[in-house]
Amino acid sequence: MPLNKTLGPDGFPAEFFKATWDILGSEISLSVLNFFQASFMPTSLNSTSLVLIPKRPGAEELKDFRPIACLNTLYKIITKLLSERIKLVLPSLVLSNQTAFVKDRLLLENVLLASEVMQGYHREGISSRITLKVDISKAFDSVRWDFLLSVLQAYKFPSSFITWIRSCVCSPSFSVSINGVTSGYFKGKTGLRQGDPLSPILFVLIMNVLSFMLNKAALEGHYGYHPGCEDLQLTHLCFADDLLIFLEGSERSLRGVFSVLSDFEKMSGLGINLQKTSMFCQGLDGASLDNIKTLFNLEASSLPVRYLGLPLSSKKLSIADCDPLLIQIQKKLDSWTNKLLSFAGRLTLLSSVISGIVGFWTSAFILPKKVIKRINSLSSSFLWHGKTGISAGAKVAWNLLSSPKIEGGLGIKDIVSWNNASALKLIWMLFFRAGSIWVAWIRRRYVSNSSFWALNDKNYSYS
């Protein structure tokens, strides 16, 4: 169990159970075993404290707060065991369109493939196409329990296993914690609790139903495939509730997609938020676009846009696309400026936090040289002076500091080397990764019967 988590209603964190395991271990084991034998979850064990976190400064209305569910540690031990069992079969159940919480599937595959599909959206004179970036309203909180149990039955989970999940998911009680004081008591009627180890796994299984529905609707001709996607029968990409839908650019296709989404909402309780749903289109004439915007209450958005924390663009990554990365690093460094950190403290933050932020971007894209130079300049200024904006005064060249400690450096990751290694990992995936839609796309579109090493196109998603 992870440590340093918010306490549940019983007030006992995971650290307490670990520290007292010699005394309480047998009792805890018996409690867990009793649940699996009796399929009974005591009300006190499944009670939940809701802590309201403001979404913005000065929040006053209920909609401006985000409820965080704090669960009992013993309950989470039980659901952790159940979730680990489901994870064993998840890769065989969940379509490859979904990359969240499934072993050996990567978030960056979604970003890379989405970049490939949307390549050329800036060009004129191309065939009509639409990409929907769908926002699912209150995703975890809206799941219908009867639908969840029906999905588990359809996946042919054992009846005893479904009973265990019903006992955990369908019997919660809630109290609201305001300023540290817990008050109120009410039963839950729908939804999955964030913080429950079971919730993300069950949510992925539910979203997999939508994946099947979208694929089936396209096969039956209810909407057209996005140009370039028909060979792979690619209709959408999912990362938990982050949903991209690719389709032919026409009113008929949009009607088909929204019909699927409406049917899914009726079954599962998961509806879309049109105000936060984005539409990207190209190749449509002005009259068709105006008609679509009026009929479906959608506005045409422009690229680049943030997708899963990375820029999604129709062109190769530019310096301007990296502005969010530079801003994020600048804010991090500025927030540490007044903390009177020692040289060793600043080095640790650069080696862990900043390297982690940069590493996330380099795992998917080759960063422009000017961006790398700017990151190194910010890092050097912070390391030597405790703040950014001072270019002079470095006692040792940055390329020496980026050397391994065994070679006399400080072990700070060299961005160029790390970027090249990440690109090589993606190339390795092209040869040895089976089941990845991104790999299948690259092989079919670019490699085909030729050799990968003979390719010289610079516009691939990984270039």
Image (tube, rainbow, N blue to C red):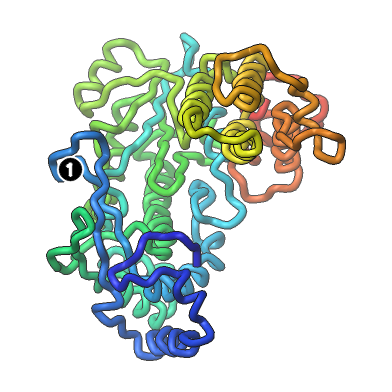
State the residue at coordinates (45%, 44%). 238
Asked if residue 143 lies left or right of residue 328, the reply is left
Q: Position of residue 210 (x, y in %)?
A: 37, 50
Q: Quadrant of the C terminus?
A: top right
Q: Out of 395 and 424, give the one closest to the viewer.
A: 395
Q: Out of 288 and 147, give the one closest to the viewer.
A: 147
Amino acid bearing label 1:
Lys
State the residue at coordinates (37%, 33%). 133
Where 302 sits versus 15, above or below? Answer: above
Q: Out of 238 and 372, give the one closest to the viewer.
A: 372
Asked if residue 95 lies left or right of residue 6, the reply is right
Q: Position of residue 123 (x, y in %)?
A: 49, 11
| Res 348 visible | yes
State the residue at coordinates (56%, 28%). 116
| Res 359 visible | no
Rendering quarter of residue 382: top right
Where 15 sits versus 303, above or below? Answer: below
Where 382 sits versus 308, above or below? Answer: above
State the residue at coordinates (35%, 90%). 38
Q: Residues within 10 Å of mark 1 (few under 14, many from 20)?
A: few
Asked if residue 348 lies left or right of residue 455, the reply is left
Element under disc 1:
helix
Q: Out of 18 and 225, give the one closest to the viewer.
A: 18
List the residue tagged with mark 1: 63
Q: Position of residue 318 (x, y in %)?
A: 57, 16
